[in-house]
Image (spheres, helix red, strand yellow):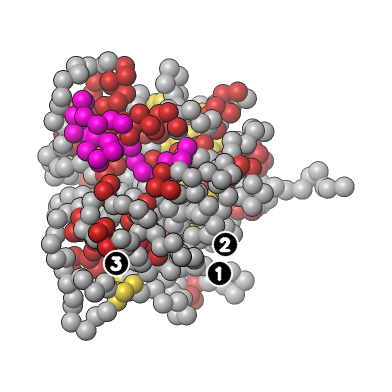
Amino acid sequence: MENQNQFDGLETFDHIVVLMLENRSFDNLLGYLYKNDEITPEKSFDGLYNPEVDYANPIPKRAGKDPGKTSISPSRAVNYSMPYPDPGEEYPHVNTQLFNTIIPDSNIGESDYKMIKPYNLSPSAGTPVMNGFVNDYENNLRSTYNIVQPTYEQYEVIMQCFEPDQIPAMATLAKEFAVFDHWYCSVPSQTYCNRAFWHAASSGGKVINPLGEDGTGFSGIDGDLSGMDSWIKEVWSLPTIFDRMNDNNVSWKVYSPIAPLSLTYIVNGTGEGEDNTHGHLDFFFDLEFGTLPKYSFVEPQFLHKHNDQHPSAVHHELATGTVKLGDELIREVYNAIKNSPKRDKILFIITHDEHGGCYDHVAPPSTVPPVAGMKGQCDFTFDRLGVRVPMIMVSSYIQPNTIINGQFEHTSFVKTVCQKWGLDPLTERDEDPAVLPFTEVFSNQKRTDWPDIPSEMSLKELLPEPDTSGDPLNGLQKAMLTSLLHIEKRKALGNTQKEDIQTIGDMMEFIKRFQ
């Protein structure tokens, strides 16, 4: 008979706090975390210091050359905005990044939403080779940023990665607590589908953010909003862990800087008519006064001075950079948890929704679809995972220098939550025995030595940022705007005349209608 007192780690926490940031791969932020001489013999870490791994990506023949160079290896990021400009993250771009193929040739120089079948995926594609990041980034510079002949200096930045001293909060927590070096996003594509998987173990067959079918749905309220129509029909109808929590009286809140709106509501349709979406000040209040719900999902700032770590579409020489702003957000949330009266019963999770086109060297493995035999958008069958993303866990029951090497993905979070609170599974993906809960991260030995993490922000960086209100919207912001335009149209919150919403300032004014 199984020992009923066997330790599984689930009893170590009563509350979960998740901070989900944007669009960074594991190698991009944590590949340099441990040098070889920092790893003890009984441990391993799949980063960027293995002398037996060829990390280089070949330079495509069509690209502007630097004499004598045929490939590019990872290197230290030169500033906190790298890679700039924003890489491609849509399904066809990710296929090129993983398999180093652009099929058909007409997809070279073509915009994201106009790439055609087979969406750069070879019919004979097997295990991803993970050496197409330079190829895709060079192509993205042509198609998205209208650069006729990208130079070596322009496309080599896709291989730049951050060293621990550049991300002190992330690096400290990853070493002082736990890092997972094989945690994958659920879909080899972009934001909406992966955030949907985090809470629903499915994206309803969707792999592309819901712009209009021509990619211009963000341009006006009477524009093409068909992408969001379809998203609401296929994704909002899916059961989520929020539904399961409601059914089982498990408390939860989403903390959003644009409350009562949230990206979680936009993606999952969760929170409409419910009092579960609150601002960041409420989160810090709940931590300080011990009123935290069982599950807290914290969203970063996605707009002006965005600290979501999403690569920027516009680079300001005087701006701090989203990676550093995001690291400061991590520090602020960590310190608030550290000083909370309930810290010993809180599990703090720091992760990213997807890799966002940033370089990673580990091939994503196969998996099972949420529904057997499903074929979704872009003919994707949901039988392979997306690229590795950072995953850091912090708890009084996680020992220093914990490195978890096992295979996990976003649906592992769903499985763990369901086991913790006795919730029914959501899909065949999270019900699959091969999708594991992450309970091995916990120790039965409680620790009290939570490290201090002082702010690394300089006086200059604490001053107001350059005015970004005139900056164009990045891909995520366009998708969010498309969604909000659709929601406004459904609810008739404002006028229905065509509007020209093209900049950060335009969007921030538009959002005020919901607040």
Q: Amino acid at mark 1?
A: Ser
- Labels 1, 3: front one: 3
* Residue 218 drawn in magenta: yes
The picture places residue 68, in percent across and down from the top left corner, at 21, 84
Residue holding disc 2: 405
Q: What residue is shown at x 29% (from left), y 67% (from top)?
A: 134
- Sequence-wise, the earlier of marks 3 and 2 is 3
In whole angstroms, how far apart are the C-alphas of marks 3 and 2?
27 Å
The picture places residue 364, in percent across and down from the top left corner, at 49, 60
Residue 162, can we see it? Answer: no
Q: What residue is shown at x 32% (from left), y 19% (from top)?
A: 490
Q: Do callouts 1 and 2 mark residues in contact (Cβ within 8 Å)? A: yes
Residue holding disc 1: 44
Q: Quadrant of residue 426?
A: top right
Q: Which residues are magenta?
A: 203-226
For the view shown, which residue lies furthest in the bottom direction? 68
Residue holding disc 3: 134
- Give the number of the disc on residue 147: none
Q: Is residue 440 left or right of residue 471?
A: right
Q: What residue is shown at x 41% (from left), y 43% (from top)?
A: 377
In whole angstroms, how far apart are the C-alphas of marks 1 and 2?
8 Å
Report the front residue among 120 and 369.
120
